[in-house]
Image (spheres, grey):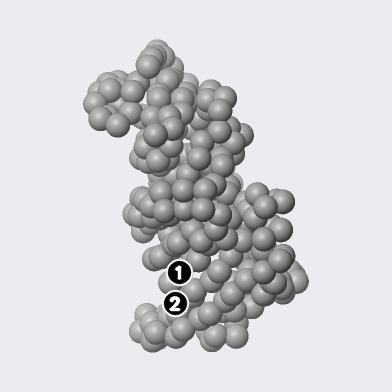
Amino acid sequence: MDKIEAIFYIEGLSNDKKALESAMAKTVEMLKSEKEASVKDIHVEDILEDPESELMPYSGMIEARIEAPFEVMVDLAIRYAPAAIDVVTTSKIELDAKRLTEILGGVSYLMGQLIERFGALAAYPKLDELEEPRIGYSREEIESMILDERMVLYRFVVETFSEDEETLKRDFSKALAYEGCRINKFVAREQGTSEKSGLKYFLVATELVSDIETLFQLVAKYSPVAIEVVEPEVVDVTPPEVQGILSDLAGFAYELVTRPLKARVLEKEGTSFKLQR
């Protein structure tokens, strides 16, 4: 099984120095105990203090050089949510469609847990300002996308709410196109109505074509209830694509887990502003 090597930069923030030291030590222990990953080297920087930061004056960084199969590295990027990742692997990896589907299922599960706890990730500009995308491509066009543009054909099912099916199809197809997808099929099925919001609940099944990085981004943002890679049978992932995928996943996870801290900072700034008035 292909292994890749990467450096994780895991950031710690706290208002208590002792608590941060303990948390960083625990993270180091967890990294070293990972059964499917090999920690080649690990360095813990000294904790720094920022006297101007009232909420989180203490910060620290763990730098860990890790070797693991791609799917394990994907899992680690989400679970440890490093502030940055530097992939040092120089060779491509090959993923068959079944293995890639299983990896994406794991991404959907882990990101779904974070989204449920911290809120949604997908955000777009005003969709009414975007053009409605084309839906449906010929077999020749799809083959050209796969062979010439190194794209992936996959099926994607998500749960969502909307006022009606027409609005859902218009807005969601625009969102998918904005993400960088080409839509071959789009089917929405109404499942009921939310008593809380009054919106209709839908299952949306799509067949999409995109590059591998967009595929991972989409799964991370939407946490689909079903995902299947259809073609090609084997996907070659280059080192720059591995870097992009892991950085995206770590960035999404980092954004979610740090939301409570950002909210506290904004609340503090708003309070300070009012007091100054």
Q: Quadrant of residue 14?
A: top left
Identify residue type, mark 1.
Answer: Val
Residue at image coords 43%, 29% = 3
- Image marks 1 and 2: residues in contact by CB distance under 8 Å: yes
Residue at image coords 44%, 85% = 190
48 lies above or below 6: above
Is 268 displayed left or right of 174 in the figure? left
The numbered mark at residue 203 is: 2
> Which class describes the residues within 10 Å of circle 2: few (<14), some (14-19), or many (20+)?
some
**Residue 110 drawn at (x, y percent):** 36, 50
Where disc 1 sits, the SS reads: strand
Q: Nearer the viewer, residue 273 or 200?
A: 200
What residue would you read off at disc 1?
A: 158
**Residue 199 drawn at (x, y percent):** 46, 82
Q: Quadrant of residue 175?
A: bottom right
243 lies above or below 145: above
Where disc 2 sits, the SS reads: strand
**Residue 245 drawn at (x, y percent):** 53, 41
